[in-house]
Every structure is written in C-alpha cells, then in structure tokens.
Amino acid sequence: MSWLALAGVAAAVAVAAALVVWRERVRETARASVAFLYDVRGEIQKVTWPDKQQLRNATLVILAFVGIVALLIGALDIVLQWLVVTLPGRLS
C-alpha cells in the first residue's frame, strides 16, 4: 500500500471517529434538554398563582407606591428648582 492510500484510510478513520463523538454529544445535549424541560414542567406545577382578589390588591399597592414616588419626585423638583433658580435670582 502506498502512503497516499494509508493517508486516505487514516483520514476516513478520523472522520468516522469525529462523527461518532459528535453524535454522542448531540445525544447527550438532547437528553439534558429533555430533562431540563421535565424539571421546568415540575417546577411550574409547584407555583401557587394568585387569585383575582390578591392580584387586584397587589396592583393597587403598586399603583399607590408609584403615585407616592411621583409626588415625592415632583415635590423634590419644585424645592430644588426654587433653591437653584429662584433663590439665587432674589439674592443678587
């Protein structure tokens, strides 16, 4: 056998080995993905979802909090505007 034929056989063996390794990696990734999805499904089933009244109460609390923060930011804006713009104009 010539060295060219041996190189071709070696290349074919290397390609076949690479394909086997690649196929096993793909299978392992597929198994891991399926296991992950089963775990996600199990965790989703454990979640306790709020009822309509709890959802309404939580929404009202959030809206009240946003309103209070808006009022505080508005008041701070008015005070800082007075301190930075109006007060120096009166002092000069």
Image (tube, rainbow, N blue to C red):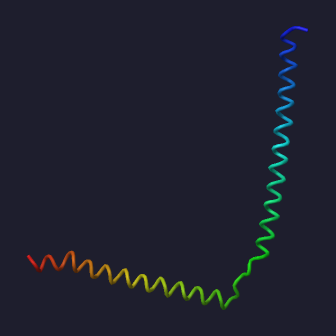
- Looking at the rendered image, the quarter that the N terminus falls into is top right
The residue at the point 82 percent across, 59 percent down is 35
The residue at the point 79 percent across, 75 percent down is 45
Side of 75 relative to 30 (left or right)? left
Q: Report x, y in % for residue 27.
A: 85, 47
Q: Report x, y in % for residue 84.
A: 21, 75
Q: Is residue 71 above or below residue 35?
A: below
Quadrant in the picture for residue 69: bottom left
Side of 78 relative to 6 (left or right)? left
Side of 92 relative to 64 (left or right)? left
Q: Report x, y in % for residue 5.
A: 87, 13
Residue that protrudes farthest toward the right in the picture: 1
The residue at the point 64 percent across, 86 percent down is 55
Quadrant in the picture for residue 13: top right
Q: Is residue 59 above or below residue 15?
A: below
Q: Report x, y in % for residue 61.
A: 54, 87
